[in-house]
Image (tube, rainbow, N blue to C red):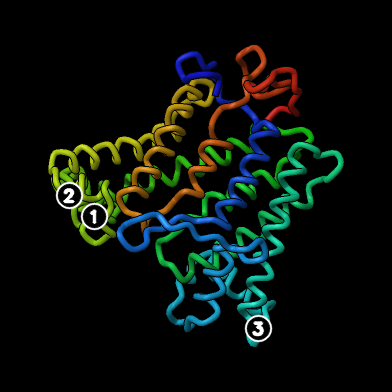
Amino acid sequence: MQGSAKGLAPSDERPVPPWARAAFYVALLLLMHTEFSFGRGAKFVPVVWPFHESELALSAALHWCHAPRAMLRLDGALGVADRLARALLPRAACGAAVRGVGAATSAALLLAAAASVAPHRLGRLAPAVGAAGLLFLEALFESTHGSNHRWLLPSLAAAALAADDPAAPTAGARELCVVAAAAVFAAAALAKLSGGYAASWLVSPAAALRWARGHTLDWALRRGVSTPAQRLLLASEPLRRAAAVATLAIELGGAAVLVAPRARRAPLVAALCVGWAGFHVGVAAAMPAVRYMPSVIVYLTLCAPWAQPRGGGGGGGGVRWAAGGGRRGGEDA
């Protein structure tokens, strides 16, 4: 993002700069092994996992390996991952095997960060292995956590980067990340406006705007851990309503990105990347159990329009990086 959204060239056909790729992998790796949760007295307590045991792998191993299959969510790709895991992983040592996948994934992400800035020496194997490991572990994690998909967007983003050549980056990989992030927010907005039923807003506009009145937010806050942000919101109904309306606005921004012309949407995407990141930070402060910090990494490193198209045009040809020009990009998207 070149300083601010106001001075940004409108075209959004931009690749991900090498430094941003590396930052994504490093930040994701750190977040997989470090987490801050609320302990006694509503104080942040750091939790650190060793390099060979990531939080994602441990959670997948703890829940998937011991949960009865009838209790798992196995629709779509989750069912494919479940069958693959049962075919490849030894049941007698399931936990150790899943943790082994996690260790290999962490090592691959570290090498992928190095490959982002030295692609000709390290090639594309590490990003591909890291993406495959993330997708596999995320599927096992999500199959046991219902609607908790906080590792989904980073896994999809890693897959998009793995499909791109870091030695000749195109705008296509970043476009996949932007569209995926926007689709997640647009789907969240639709769920709130429809009460969980896609067509219910056609029947009752009043029911469709229930979320905006703050009732659902009040219910969610009262079920969570007491924090300063939670107590502040519970003490003020106008503030809760403002937060609910702001949530809808932020999430509807995803729908705006999906329909906005790509040649004109860069300032919108830049502003929303900051807004989406702030939204998740605010949610984590008020409801610590809802931690989507892995997605924040995607918004700020991969989705943000850091690369400036040469001549303010499309994504083809060379590209100037906003953080130190002169670096040349790849082919047309």
Q: Amino acid at mark 2?
A: Leu
Q: Would you name the residue on which mark 2 appears?
A: 234
- The residue that appears at 30% across and 49% down in the rendered structure is 286
State the residue lying farthest toward the right: 121
Residue 125, position as x, y percentages in the image: 79, 52
The residue tagged with tag 1: helix, strand or loop?
A: helix
- The residue that appears at 43% across and 39% down in the rendered structure is 277
Q: CA distance from mark 2 to mark 1?
A: 7 Å
241 shown above or below 42: above
Residue 268, position as x, y percentages in the image: 44, 26
Q: Would you name the residue on which mark 1 appears?
A: 221
Q: Would you name the residue on which mark 3 appears?
A: 93
Q: Left or right: 291 with respect to 321?
A: left
Q: Amino acid at mark 1?
A: Leu
Residue 166 appears in the rendering:
yes
Mark before the other along the chain sequence, 3 or 1: 3
Q: Amino acid at mark 3?
A: Ala
- The residue that appears at 51% across and 65% down in the rendered structure is 76
107 shown above or below 202: below
Q: Residues within 10 Å of mark 3 (few under 14, many from 20)?
A: few
Q: Nearer the viewer, residue 157 or 331?
A: 157
Residue 221, position as x, y percentages in the image: 23, 55
